Amino acid sequence: MARLPRLNLPGYPYLVVQRGNNGQAIVSTASDYQLLLALIDENARKFGVAIHAYVLMGDHFQLLATPTSADGLPQMMQALGRRYVRYFNDRQGRSGTLWEGRYRSTLMDAERYLLPCMAFMDLKPAREGIVKEPRDYSWSSHAHYVGLRSDRMVTPHALFWTLGNTPFAREAAYVELVRVGVSREQQEALTRSTLGGWALGDENFVSDLQKLTGRRVSKTRSGRPVRATESP
């Protein structure tokens, strides 16, 4: 079965995941992390993509990003991917692919999922036992949002500003949001939608989104079609 084309609509936030081939490491030194961040920043600016949050892990990275054009996100990912692979292969004395195929992504309803997605990303290093607390991890945007450092690559989404009227209030509210964490249902929805390339939101959101594109935005129900007289 032919794979679906990407769902590329500007102005919506996407969770993007790029993994190493066969689970292999994509970074091995602090210089690798720094170079990967620099390339994300450079190409996000070049192709008009706002980076709201990020986390770099040993075998993959995740971005929460909003493109301003339909081609912005794929162009950014292609450009940074190619340049980083050349750098990493030269540094490691290796050849061939580094990535596990093309990146995965889900377009999401910001009102419902953006802040939980940020917490989901921030908690990743702690879930994997790398650090005890998100603030202890150097390679994510968490420190920017809790006031530990200023990160020029990060463009806060408008929803972040609704957390409080002052920087201190927003930081405190965000700390609490991450402390509370993400429900299993939210985690599963984010994971399932990203792996499938489907839009993430309620029925009204998905229905409205479908009107904007000829590409199917949600997974069809398996089995025989449901007749009008049958229960769904």
Image (spheres, rainbow, N blue to C red):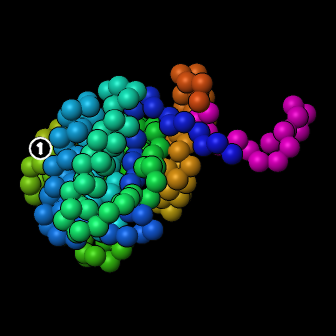
Can residue 148 be seen here?
Answer: yes
For residue 49, what is the image quadrant?
top left
Q: Residue 59 lies in magenta, yes or no?
A: no
Task: State the quadrant of the C terminus.
Answer: top right
Q: Residue at x 33, y 43 (%)?
A: 77
For residue 100, what is the image quadrant?
bottom left
Task: State the quadrant of the N terminus.
Answer: top right
Q: Which residue is mark 1?
A: 152
Can residue 13 be seen here?
Answer: no
Q: Residue furthest right?
A: 229
Q: Residue at x 82, y 48 (%)?
A: 223
In the foreground, 94 or 72: 94
Query: Where's residue 9, x and y in %?
Result: 44, 28
Q: Residue 231 lies in magenta, yes or no?
A: yes
Please give left or right for residue 184 compared with residue 70 in the image. Answer: right
In the foreground, 120 or 92: 92
Q: Residue at x 42, y 69 (%)?
A: 23
Q: Residue at x 36, y 74 (%)?
A: 128
Residue type at tag 1: Arg
Badge 1 element: loop
Please give left or right for residue 131 compared with residue 225 in the image. Answer: left
For residue 114, what is the image quadrant?
top left
Query: Where's residue 15, x and y in %?
Result: 40, 46
Query: Where's residue 10, x and y in %?
Result: 39, 27
Query: Start and end of the magenta stretch?
Result: 216-232
Please give left or right for residue 136 compared with residue 24 in the image. Answer: left
